[in-house]
Each structure stands twice: as C-alpha cells, then as structure tokens.
Amino acid sequence: MNEIEHLSIGGYAFRLEVDAAAQLRNYIGSLESYYLPQPDGREIMDSIEERLAELLTGRQVDVVKAEDVAAVTAILGKPEAIEDSVPGLE
C-alpha cells in the first residue's frame, strides 16, 4: 500500500499518493514561479488552482495517483500554454 498525503487545492481537500503529491507540488511551483511575479498573479493562481481541483474531482477517484496528476497537468499545460489559452492573460 502506498503512503497517502492530504493536500488542499483550490479550496478542496484531496488524498494523494506521495509521488502524486510531489508531482503536483512541482507543477504548482512552476506555475507560481511564472505567475506570482505578474500583476494579479495571486488571482491567476487561484483561478488555475480552482480549475485544477475541478479536473481532479472529475476523475472521481478516492486517492489521486501520479497518472491522474499527469493527465490533469497535460490538460492544463505549461504556464505559457495556460496564458495563451486564457483571454486577457498577457
């Protein structure tokens, strides 16, 4: 059995396998490095985290695994891709 971590994302609580939690922290960290220095960076991150939580919830799993995180982060993409796909973010 894998170890489980509890993590709050976008105001929602998730149970993640340890490797999935580390993968998600790295992804969120890369987003924060990109967006937080920008004007309204905190609001942008809040929106992205809400979308991330929505996508994870949609997977309907009791425990989020690394493959769930990979699928969700592939949907959202890298910071530059997110910025290009959201009108008004520049």
Image (spheres, rainbow, N blue to C red):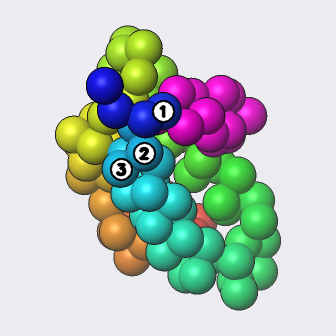
Q: Amino acid at mark 3?
A: Asp
Distance from disc 1 to disc 2, alpha carbons, whole Å, reads 6 Å
Determine whether the residue tagged by mark 3 lies in a helix, strand or loop.
helix
Q: Is residue 12 above or below residue 5?
A: above
Range drawn in magenta: 5-16
Residue displayed at 49% across by 41% down = 52
Determine whether the residue tagged by mark 1 lies in a helix, strand or loop.
strand
Residue 38 on image: x %, y %: 70, 83
Residue displayed at 35% across by 50% down = 19
Residue 30 in sight here: yes
Residue 20 on image: x %, y %: 37, 46
Distance from disc 2 to disc 3, alpha carbons, whole Å, reads 4 Å
Q: Amino acid at mark 1?
A: Ile
Distance from disc 1 to disc 3, alpha carbons, whole Å, reads 9 Å
Residue displayed at 70% across by 52% down = 46
Reading the chain from its start, which is encountered first: label 1 or label 3?
1
